[in-house]
């Protein structure tokens, strides 16, 4: 566009600058075109395209294994594409390293962002790019503390930059991760499942921070499996399926049902495929179980072929109760009866041997050894049974892994693939398969579908339904109310370490359950 001559009238000059502004708005800040990435035995991405605009949120949508994580690694310099190009402000760029991505202004905040508990907030924000002063490059702590405080103030977060990270809540740690991203003067911010560990109140606060980032002109890529969040904060969407670009557009032009169909390639009509079963005899009884700091006076029973749901807000004591039932921690008083016998679990191995296993919420830290292959993770709790003579039998391990990984529809090119290379949802499936393979009497599923896409959730729910149909007793802890209401035969609600309500399936509305969980409408359990 040629600028008008000096003598041009005001209308022409206005039209020129309006055109320039329109071009700026219409040009994505970051574009990926024809991105293809291949690993041995699998094509992770094929001809993928993505556009991110300043001041806008683009949702990246797809099942686990759709290629979202691989695409993010291409955008942040961890992987190099085999084909295709990246354009920043319409100019082709290459990102050979993560440092190169930082210099351009691209940063990612992951669901499990690596931060350092023993360091201060300021140190976490500036680790890797400290500020120095003087000829001898002495660390400039006053400047870093001041800048950290300014960034946190911009986010309207009340955190002292001098406190150690371990003293903060999960939500506050997420804010520190965002502050770290802003310390790089990031223009492109990738938010990968940022609300997975947040309470509803904290999620609302997170939405407000996203709005502030938009007002600052940041281009935001938002990755989430929660459709209510996607429709609440996104302006645009891009859908991937099996590593292939499917569709993109404005979020206002698509419905949730249409999005799901394009995402999974099929209709998902039975998200909660609960098979009706008649519960059998009681297998687990808990009487007056107490812990000095986490929970008190817990009483319930569990029958064969039953799913017992536990619901509560963050800090309700649900996970801590499950840890006591599975031998991770010791209750101060009370009784656990399994098949009529009083049991005392001094360590998790005692509970496992008795027939109680737990799929933990923190899959990477507690659920799997992610550096090991899928087959070894699934067989790990049963090494002595699979190898009675002390000699490793790879064929037996492989058969066990093949059986359970296939039943749970784990997406991998081989059962020798390290768990750390799988998507989050497929990692969770491996952990579930590991414990189901022990053929337990009671299985505890703590947030079993956390970070799993809708298609994988349906597969896990289907498998859960089949298990109770075969007589397995299931305890399911979930923060997703539709999941609890859709899958549980009974729902126990906890608030601040106490059982405050118990409902049978279909008895209570969502409002009554949430009211009890918040302490506003407690009912006798």
Image: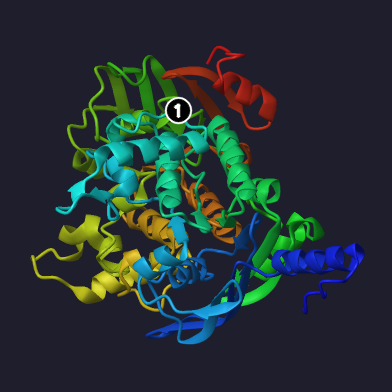
Residue 365 appears in the rendering: yes
Q: In the drawing, does residue 197 fall left or right of residue 126? A: right
Which residue is the site of mark 1?
158
Q: Nearer the viewer, residue 282 or 66?
A: 66
User: Which residue occupies 60% across, 35% down?
Assistant: 204
Which of 57 and 243 lies nearest the eye of the viewer?
Answer: 57
Point out residue 88 in the picture as x, y percentages from the top left corner: 55, 72
Q: Is residue 121 above or below residue 452?
A: above
The single residue placed furthest to the front in the displayed view is 7
User: Where residue 248 sits: x, y (%)?
Assistant: 70, 69
Residue at position x 27%, y 51% in the image: 130
Residue 173: quarter of image: top left
Q: Residue, x 47% and y 62% (percent of image)?
A: 105
Q: Name the side, left or right, on which 128 lies relative to 35.
A: left
Instruction: Indicate whether 92 appears above or below 470.
Output: below
Q: Nearer the viewer, residue 113 or 39?
A: 113
Expressed as whole percent of the image width and height from the top left, the position of residue 55 reads 65, 54
């Amino acid at each position: 566009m040629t600028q008008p001559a000096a003598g041009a009238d005001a209308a022409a000059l206005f039209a020129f600058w309006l055109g320039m502004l329109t071009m700026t708005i219409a040009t994505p800040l970051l574009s990926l075109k024809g991105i293809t990435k291949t690993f041995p035995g699998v094509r992770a991405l094929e001809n993928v395209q993505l556009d991110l605009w300043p001041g806008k949120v683009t949702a990246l949508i797809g099942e686990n294994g759709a290629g979202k994580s691989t695409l993010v690694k291409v955008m942040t310099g961890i992987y190099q594409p085999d084909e295709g190009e990246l354009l920043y402000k319409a100019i082709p760029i290459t990102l050979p390293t993560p440092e190169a991505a930082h210099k351009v202004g691209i940063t990612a905040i992951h669901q499990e962002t690596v931060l350092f508990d023993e360091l201060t907030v300021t140190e976490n924000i500036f680790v890797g790019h400290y500020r120095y002063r003087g000829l001898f490059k002495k660390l400039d702590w006053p400047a870093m503390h001041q800048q950290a405080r300014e960034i946190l103030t911009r986010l309207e977060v009340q955190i002292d930059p001098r406190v150690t990270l371990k003293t903060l809540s999960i939500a506050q740690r997420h804010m520190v991760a965002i502050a770290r991203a802003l310390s790089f003067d990031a223009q492109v911010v990738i938010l990968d499942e940022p609300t997975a560990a947040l309470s509803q109140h904290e999620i609302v606060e997170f939405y407000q921070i996203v709005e502030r980032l938009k007002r600052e002109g940041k281009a935001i890529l938002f990755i989430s499996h929660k459709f209510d969040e996607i429709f609440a904060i996104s302006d645009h969407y891009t859908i991937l399926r099996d590593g292939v670009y499917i569709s993109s557009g404005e979020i206002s032009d698509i419905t949730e049902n249409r999005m799901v169909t394009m995402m999974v390639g099929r209709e998902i009509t039975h998200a909660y495929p609960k098979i009706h079963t008649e519960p059998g005899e009681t297998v687990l009884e808990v009487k007056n179980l107490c812990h000095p700091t986490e929970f008190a006076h817990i009483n319930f029973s569990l029958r064969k072929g039953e799913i017992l749901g536990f619901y509560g807000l963050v800090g309700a004591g649900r996970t801590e109760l499950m840890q006591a039932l599975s031998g991770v921690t010791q209750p101060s008083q009370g009784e656990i009866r399994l098949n009529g016998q009083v049991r005392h679990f001094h360590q998790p191995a005692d509970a496992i041997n008795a027939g109680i296993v737990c799929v933990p919420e923190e899959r990477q830290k507690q659920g799997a050894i992610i550096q090991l292959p899928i087959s070894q993770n699934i067989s790990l709790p049963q090494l002595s049974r699979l190898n009675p003579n002390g000699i490793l039998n790879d064929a037996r391990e492989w058969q066990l892994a093949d059986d359970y990984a296939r039943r749970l529809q784990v997406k991998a090119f081989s059962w020798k693939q390290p768990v750390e290379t799988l998507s989050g949802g497929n990692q969770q499936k491996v952990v579930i398969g590991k414990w189901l393979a022990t053929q337990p009497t009671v299985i505890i599923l703590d947030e079993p579908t956390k970070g799993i896409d809708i298609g994988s959730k349906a597969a896990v729910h289907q498998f859960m339904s089949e298990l109770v149909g075969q007589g397995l007793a299931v305890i399911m802890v979930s923060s997703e109310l539709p999941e609890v209401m859709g899958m549980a035969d009974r729902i126990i609600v906890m608030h601040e370490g106490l059982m405050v309500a118990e409902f049978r399936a279909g008895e209570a509305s969502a409002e009554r359950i949430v009211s009890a969980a918040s302490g506003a409408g407690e009912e006798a359990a």
